[in-house]
Amino acid sequence: MAHDVPFDTMPSLDGDSLWRRLEQVVDIGNRFAGTPGESQCREHLLSEFDAAGLANVRAEPFPFLGYEPRGASCEVVSDTLALRCAPLQYSADAVADGEAIYLGASRPEDVAALESRGVELAGKVVVAHSFMPWLVAPALAEKNIAALVNVTETGDGLIPNFLVSFYPNGLDAPWDGRVQSVPGVTIEKEQSRELLSLMSTRSVRIRVEHRAEYAEGTSANVVGEIRGSELPDERVVIGAHYDTQLEGVGAADNGTGIAALLEIAERWRELQPRRTIVFCAFGVEELASWGSYNYCRQHVAELNGTRGMINLDALGLPLPGTRVAVADAEMAPFAVESAGRAGYEIEDEIDGSAYAWSDHNPFIDAGVPAAWLWRFPPQHPFYHSAGDVLRYVNAERMLDVATASAYVGFRMAQAPELGLGRSRPTKRFVDLRPPA
């Protein structure tokens, strides 16, 4: 298969056009699930898909458990020191206090190290560093901690927005397991140093309050297609999420992915691919990959014929990070080789099924090989905060990653013999595979 679909046969993406599309998405503003900005972006996508000449353009609604913050506070009780904080989404609507204990990076090995020394976590307020607290929060809640205080490294006085519950927890009504049993907050960087300094000298007691309302809402995926000319019942999905976190315009995450999705659709409008190409803008990724999960649920009859998925997310990060392929074991060699042909030499591979963090995960769980190309680490310095603005998007890197990602999808759509089987996850979070 070394020369099955030459890279130079793919219609190229235009960097200036890609940037203009990013500006249009950013101009809409915040697109947090359930806000007017989210709805406006959905209408923009429907219009752009129609303008690109895609077939069968539609919105596919789905329900989700919405998050509405009502306030959060964090204070050192003995010193009456109030710490600037932001709520941890999907933590309990509650107030709790307890002795503070430091957990480091909140990895499983950090928990094990504490417990091996006889430290009891029950009833404690756990203080920990993480930009993915959902990976550890459910396990901590099971240990009956009192509350979770997340420490951020974001600068400029900004506090990023994080969750304690992600895919696949509670994505179906009645949403069991979605809201965790303990309250939580993220505290501002400089004040976190003050807190850790206090904790290094003596026992500290912390009071955490998180107030929120949880109500069912409706979002939608926006879908359009280029019909396959030879194998129309075989599909390749190219997807990107269009929502943002609670604050900011989400320029990198994920204005870049949506801009790339629209640019690819426009540039390929005259294409006659062997397989059907499905373009999907997913809703509510930031709150648990709800859109991609529901796509797999709603399209279960098509999953056996869906040959692969490429995820477009956070493509133009400002730091010169590692070129990485996040993929399951079946997709990884294909994605790495394809990216290399496009001039994007992969420097590292991450098992995309090992832990959940974006829209590729439901597809892997559904049996569809999937990949996500980006630059990581390091993470965006203003990840999930109001600092994710255009000035911190690198246009050259955005085009670079978008082009390599597009070629992975193009090659899947055009190869005479694709050679991809079903996904091979190391860990299947939930079984979304259709019946045999």
Image (cartoon, grey):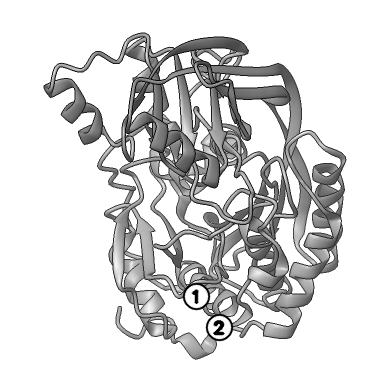
The quadrant in which the N terminus is found is bottom left
Label 2: element kind? loop
**In which image quadrant can residue 197 be found?**
top left
Q: Residue at x 41, y 73 (%)?
A: 416
| Relative vertical location of residue 369 with respect to residue 114 in this rendering, above or below | below
Residue 407 tag number: 1
| Residue placed most toward the observer, 237 or 4 | 237
- The mark tally for this picture is 2
Q: Position of residue 53 (x, y in %)?
A: 80, 67
Which mark is first along the chain, 1 or 2?
2
**Residue 355 percent coordinates (x, y):** 36, 41
Instruction: Identify the amino acid type marked 2.
Output: Met
- Secondary structure under the numbered disc 1 in the rendered image: helix
Position in image of residue 44 (x %, y %) = 85, 56
In the figure, residue 123 lies in which quadrant?
Answer: top left
Is residue 36 visible in the rendered image? The answer is yes
State the residue in front, 104 or 410: 104
Looking at the image, residue 219 lies above or below residue 59: above
* Distance (Cα) linking label 2 and label 1: 7 Å
Name the side, left or right, on which 393 lies relative to 325. right
Using the rendered image of the protein, determine whether residue 433 is visible from the camera's viewpoint. Answer: no
> Please, is residue 11 above or below residue 46 in the view?
below
Question: Which residue occupies 46% across, 73% down?
Answer: 411
Residue sticking out furthest to the left: 116
Label 2: few (<14), some or many (≥20) within 10 Å? some
In the rendered image, residue 67, in percent from the top left (x then y), is placed at 69, 26
* Residue 19, disc: none
Specify the quadrant that holds the C terminus.
Answer: top left
Query: Are circles 2 and 1 on residues that touch, CB within 8 Å?
Result: yes
Q: Amino acid at mark 1?
A: Tyr
Q: Which residue is mark 2?
A: 10
